[in-house]
Image (cartoon, helix red, strand yellow):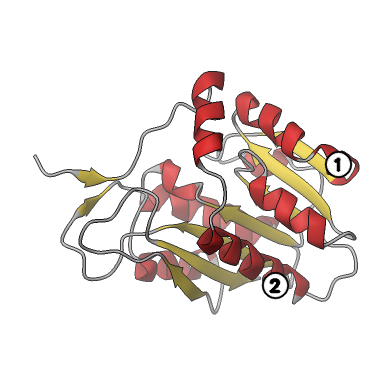
Amino acid sequence: MAEIVGALHEFHDETFVRGWADRFKPTPDRLALFDLILKQIEDLRIGAPHVLELGIGPGYLAHHILERAPNLRYEGLDFSEAMFGIARETLAQHLDRLTLTSADLTDPTWSQSLSRQPDAIISTWSLHDLFSPAAVGDVYARCFETLQPGGVLVNGDFIKPDGTTLEYEGGRFEVSKHLELLRQAGFTKPECVELFEIETEAPTAAQNYACLVAHR
């Protein structure tokens, strides 16, 4: 049986989560993605935007953005209480601007749990864990419905790169499919603004990710 590029996680297990967070410290490439996401938020030209992160995890992206954008408010959604514990530690200096919201993206009513309507929805390395294009497309549709008019969705996530002959887990699929799903959700001009760590021959599960941007 051919090896499938992907990874399995136990995000409700505190020991696993702490070990995963230690291994997942942002690299220079990942920090470049964080900067690209921050630029998309800044380009909205909103004085005090409300930013929603889908899958806040250990809080690395949130920390990067909150350190550099003192006027925004941040809401981190996740389904893992173990992740929330680490995020509170990572973001201890920013808790006054942070809301943590417990919800599962496989539940189509997740957006009803939000504290307010977001100006920007962002995510990194999370939606692929929904394991299918259909499930990711459902989240894209909820994002379109949830965003403020003029808002932006930025998804930095693992993809299946063009030109590979390898099999990938179901949530890692081609950029072209992401763009199709975003258009189906209602976004008019979605785009892939950058690809990171592309490796088609012998990839690890931590390589091959894209920054996808779609405006409401």
Q: Is residue 90 above or below residue 182?
A: above
Q: Label 1 amino acid?
A: Gln
Q: Is residue 180 above or below residue 139?
A: below
Evaluate whether residue 13 shows in this view.
no
The location of residue 176, given as percent across then percent down, is: 36, 71
Q: Which residue is mark 1?
A: 93
Along the line of sight, which residue is nearer the eye, 124 or 49?
Answer: 124
Along the line of sight, which residue is nearer the eye, 116 or 64?
Answer: 64
Crowd class of label 2 (few under 14; some 14 to 19; many from 20; radius 10 Å) = few
Q: What residue is at 82 percent from the left and 76 percent from the top?
A: 45
Q: Quadrant of residue 153?
A: bottom right
Relative horizontal placement of residue 169, taking residue 9 as reference (left or right):
left
Q: What residue is at 45 percent from the left and 26 percent from the top?
A: 10
Q: Label 2 amino acid?
A: Lys
Disc 2 to disc 1, C-alpha distance? 22 Å
Q: Are marks 2 and 1 in contact (CB under 8 Å)?
A: no
Evaluate whether residue 104 shows in this view.
yes
Secondary structure state at the residue bearing disc 2: helix
Q: Which residue is mark 2?
A: 39
Residue at the limit of the structure toward the bottom, as seen here:
189
Frontmost of labels 2 and 1 is 1
The location of residue 4, given as percent across then percent down, is: 22, 45
Q: Quadrant of residue 198?
A: bottom left
Secondary structure state at the residue bearing disc 1: helix
Crowd class of label 1 (few under 14; some 14 to 19; many from 20; radius 10 Å) = few
Relative horizontal placement of residue 104, taking residue 90 as reference (left or right):
left
The location of residue 42, given as percent across then percent down, is: 77, 72
